[in-house]
Image (cartoon, rainbow, N blue to C red):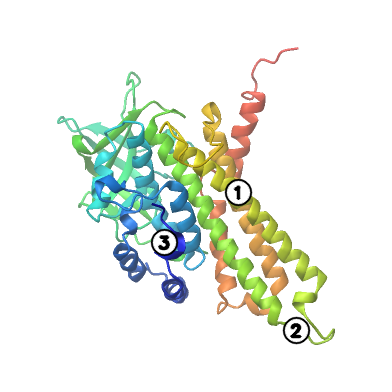
Amino acid sequence: MTVDAAALLPDPLLRSFRERAAVHDRENTFPRDDLEDLRELGYLRLLVPRELGGIGASLLEASRIQRRLAGAAPATALAMNMHLVITGAALHAQRLGVEGADPLLEHALAGRLLAFGISEPGNEAMLFDSQTVARSDGQGGYLLEGTKIFTSLAPVWDRLVVHGRIPGDDVDLPLVLGSIERTDAVETLEDWDTHGMRATQSRTTRLHGARLAPEDVITRTPVGPNTDPFVVGIFGSFELLLASVYTGLAERAVELGTQIASRRRSVTRGIVLADDPDVRRRLAGAAIALDGSVLQIEKLVADLDALGTGTDTGGPGTVDHGTRWFLQLSGVKHRATEAAIGAVDQVLRASGGAHFSRTSELERLSRDVRAGLYHPSDDESVHGSYARALLGEIGAERGE
């Protein structure tokens, strides 16, 4: 049984989301009404397997659903991405027989909202290292001290997936990942006032000895890229769902651009701008780029769905990318977000000065799409990874 994006998110509901999005952007507030509507639809259980009581969507279906949601309320979609990244990673780990992530699926099934606390100031290694210190609590758990940034869903999450580094040079697996509760040891700052994606409310989180209980430890890993199933699941879900959101946002921009061109007239030339060769070329170029993004995203999502299951759940032709998984995942996120930014810019150029106004949906989309510049993996990181794959490390010994 498939989960259809249009059936789950019908047009009337999306119109409500779109109307609210303008208000939350203007007022810099979290879309609580959107969250409640999505809860009622079972969105928090979207990636929980059907045999556990969830909706049982594949990651491919979730990608399509997120594209559709992003076309109405990009910040709502981006915020909900974080819950779906966690449940997507847990689903991936469960498929590969890892039990540590099962409690996350149980939390989602119980209606608890999961968030993602990995980003740290200055930590370019992101998921693969941490500046947060994880000290033993003497009971099999850890006390976490550190600062997390860009914590989407900050006002409303129930559990936060975080990582920290166990101090010491002789620790075999120094990185610990797990989920924590919201307690007095978790401080959420009110510091989110940004250019775009304002409704995500991705505020800074400070951990002041926050306790990671033994039963909430998901996994421990070495520093650096590794093949831990939960880590691969997080990385893959994060990159692919980000690409989906920004692509869905840009698809909406092209839809708006098409509507504008069909009704806007040139007084001096006496033509509808839909007949202007320059406008036609700009909109066509934007649509071509986004079609390419959709094809790339869906191929790689299908590959990730199929990884480790022993069946081609994503459809014919799925591939295990082996040592190139991280390259492929970061590459498609980079290409899709750059294509989305370029597409929105082309629509703006084709649509006239009226859409420089804050009353224009297109103006808001033009700000929201630029958040894609800052999400991992960013331009520098992707190019650095591909350069290492091709040329080795800087200063490495070279053959003749």
Which residue of the protein is positioned furthest toward the left in this rendering? Answer: 139
Q: Closer to the camera, 246 or 58? A: 58
Residue type marked 3? Thr
Question: Could you classify mark 3 by the number of other residues whose Cα lies within 10 Å: few (under 14), some (14-19), or many (20 or more)?
Answer: many
Residue visible at 62% across and 27% down in the picture? 389
x, y percentage for residue 325? 52, 33
Q: Which mark is residue 265?
A: 2
Residue visible at 33% across and 63% down in the picture? 41
Q: Secondary structure at mark 3?
A: helix
> Is disc 2 in contact with disc 1, using a CB cutoff of under 8 Å?
no
Q: Secondary structure at mark 1?
A: helix
Q: CA distance from mark 2 to mark 1?
A: 34 Å
How many numbered discs? 3
Residue type marked 2? Arg
387 lies left or right of 54: right
Residue visible at 41% across and 27% down in the picture? 223
Q: Which mark is residue 58?
A: none
Q: Closer to the camera, 5 or 237? A: 5
Asked where in the image residue 141 lies, by quadrant, the reply is top left
Asked where in the image residue 144 lies, by quadrant, the reply is top left
Is 160 rendered above or below residue 79? Answer: above
Q: CA distance from mark 2 to mark 3?
A: 37 Å
Precedes in sequence: disc 3 or disc 1: 3
Does residue 193 appear in this view? no
Question: Could you classify mark 2 by the number of other residues whose Cα lies within 10 Å: few (under 14), some (14-19), or many (20 or more)?
Answer: some
x, y percentage for residue 362? 59, 71
Q: Secondary structure at mark 2?
A: strand
Q: Closer to the camera, 71 or 308? A: 308
Tag in front: 2 or 1:
1
Q: Which residue is mark 1?
A: 295
Q: Which residue is mark 3?
A: 200
